Amino acid sequence: MPTYSTPGAARTVRRRAGRHRQTTWSRLLRGLLSAIGVTLAGVLLFALLMQWLRPSDTVIRIINQLIKLASIFVGALVTVGRGGEKGMLLGAALGFIYMLLGVALYALLSGQQLPFTSYLSDVAMGIAGGGIAGAIISGMRHSRG
């Protein structure tokens, strides 16, 4: 029988995972779209539940903030990935962009003019929430199994 040999067969070739080939902007865009999707799903679900629960204005505001934070967390998970690098920075950037878009859309669609400090506190919450989420996510390790 003939013997076949392939040159360089003993050499291992390492390929980068798909996440590492993406630019930072494309990762942020994917995370932002994921956060927007979670927001839409959360708002839709809460709107359906409001018909039965009849919550007070305070409960509505709290649920609204929780939906925003959950959306930022999911967006940071998509952007950073478990064990990813620069988690706090990317998470904070995602939170900033997400809240900036949310504040701008709210101002345009509602026609209400809230105090500047109200807008600023929402954006600050997004930056802080995104930074914390990104730091937590980048500290997670991939499960082996």
Image: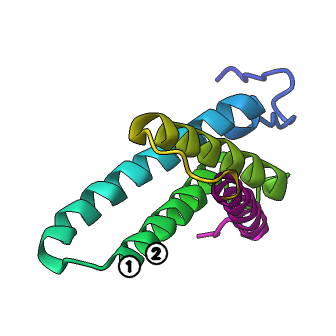
Of the pair 11 and 91, the residue shown nearer to us? 91
Q: Amino acid at mark 2?
A: Ile
Q: Nearer the viewer, residue 110 or 38?
A: 110
- Tell me if residue 52 comes above or below residue 18 in the rendering: below
Q: Main secondary structure of the magenta part?
A: helix
Q: Is residue 51 above or below residue 122?
A: below
Q: Which of 93 and 122 lies nearest the eye of the viewer?
A: 122
The structure residue drawn at horizontal position 56% and vertical position 51%, both measured from the top left corner, is 114
Residue drawn 13% across the image and 69% down it: 51
- Quarter of the image containing the N terminus? top right
Q: Secondary structure at mark 1?
A: helix
- The magenta stretch is 118-145
Image spot of residue 4 (x, y percent):
73, 22
Residue 25 visible: yes
Image disc number at residue 59:
1
The amino acid type of the residue labelled 1 equals Val
Marks 1 and 2: CB-CB under 8 Å? yes
Viewer-proximal residue, 129 or 63?
Answer: 63
21 to the left or right of 48: right
**What residue did someone put label 2 on?**
62
- Which residue lies at the image location 23% right of the left edge and 61% below the top edge? 47
Q: Position of residue 55 (x, y in %)?
A: 26, 78
Tell me the quarter of the image containing the C terminus.
Answer: bottom right
